[in-house]
Image: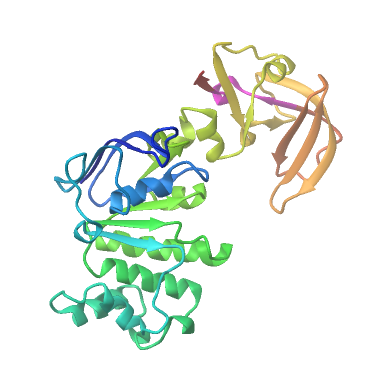
Amino acid sequence: MLEIHSLSKSYDKGKSFALKNVSFNLNEGDVCALVGESGSGKTTLVRLIAGLETPDAGNIVLNGEMFSSLHNFVPPEKRKVGLVFQEYALFPHMTLFKNVLYGISRQKNKKIRAQEVLDLVGLGEMKERYPHQLSGGQQQRVALARALAPNPSLLILDEPFSNLDAMLRAQLRNEIFEIVKKTGVTAIFVTHDTQDALAVADEILILQKGELIQKDEAANLYIKPNSIYVASLFGNTIHLSQELQSAFKCPLNPKCSHAIRHENFAINEECEHVTHARVIKRTFLGNKTQLLLKLDSGQNLAVFTKDGNVADRIKIGFNSTDVLEFNN
């Protein structure tokens, strides 16, 4: 239902690109997480989709209608795209009910619809309260209700949980995406937190320096990342340099880059590729301990273990099947 074709955007007349030749499709009813570090182009992409920016090249098609091209531009208010921001952007002088009504003031049965969406997010009985009387999580649910009120074709959630503490974040994330799935609305969820993306998304789209480098289901991104960058986003990884390959007696294809995830190192077990090491530091991290090792070959290596009684001298290794390989 959403088609992006060769989308590009520059803010300095083509000297550099915030977004460069990005193309992808999104199916109706899916939740797509948009992941990348700061400056990767996430915000630029969603602003282009919402109509808050104009592209320098490429097309945006929503439900078969051309929204952006070199010859056509549909303004934001006519795109049926709902937006939920991390700042909530609620009017402090309005009740929750009036905040939701504001975006559907010209709609028939607007009061019935406002009550419906407030009930949907579990705040129907609080409709006469003001934003300052709510918790951060409740304010975010009001923002969601307001975005859903006009029945958007596409919902964009731009870093909606960034202002919340870790415990509330996970709880609210699950609640909000349960609501999103219940409505059946197609959604793009912008986040830098890969755990959030893994928890709720049908597909994950990875941006790096303005370019789309991989789009896939969460499980595939973990099992078959197409670069060390993508692998590192979804778990701690160690780059297997030539020195480490030599230390573990594991010669690999010199035309490729290689990595292994922390959890695939095995301590004092039989593996294909092993070496010995001395533990020089232990850091207790709750359900696991980080070990800083000095390999017999001289390299330092940090690994994790759930065994809190590891000796000062250990054997460490991994198997070939756990090695991730990437074309340079």
Is 10 in front, or is 167?
10
Q: Is residue 136 covered in magenta?
A: no
Q: Which residues are magenta?
A: 316-324
State whether residue 164 is above or below residue 230. below
Residue 54 drawn above or below residue 183: above
- x%, y% of residue 128? 35, 88
Residue 238 vs residue 169: left or right?
A: right
Question: In front: 318, or 328?
Answer: 328
**In the picture shown, does residue 88 fall above or below 244?**
below
Picture quadrant where residue 152 is located: bottom left
How far from the left and from the top, in percent, is residue 160? 44, 61
- Hey, which residue is sitting farthest front in the picture? 13
Identify the colour scheme used.
rainbow
Q: Residue at x 84, y 35 (%)?
A: 279
Q: Nearer the viewer, residue 1 or 104?
A: 104
* Left or right: 303, with 319 as reference point: right
Residue drawn where x is 47% and y is 32% of the image: 223
Question: Which x, y percent locates residue 29?
Answer: 25, 52
**Left or right of 149, for residue 218:** right
Q: Position of residue 235 (x, y in %)?
A: 57, 40
Count the numbered circles shown. Answer: 0
Instruction: Judge by depth and name the residue closer to the eye, 274 or 2.
Output: 2
**Residue at horizontal 52 percent and vertical 60 percent from the top:** 162
Magenta span includes 318: yes
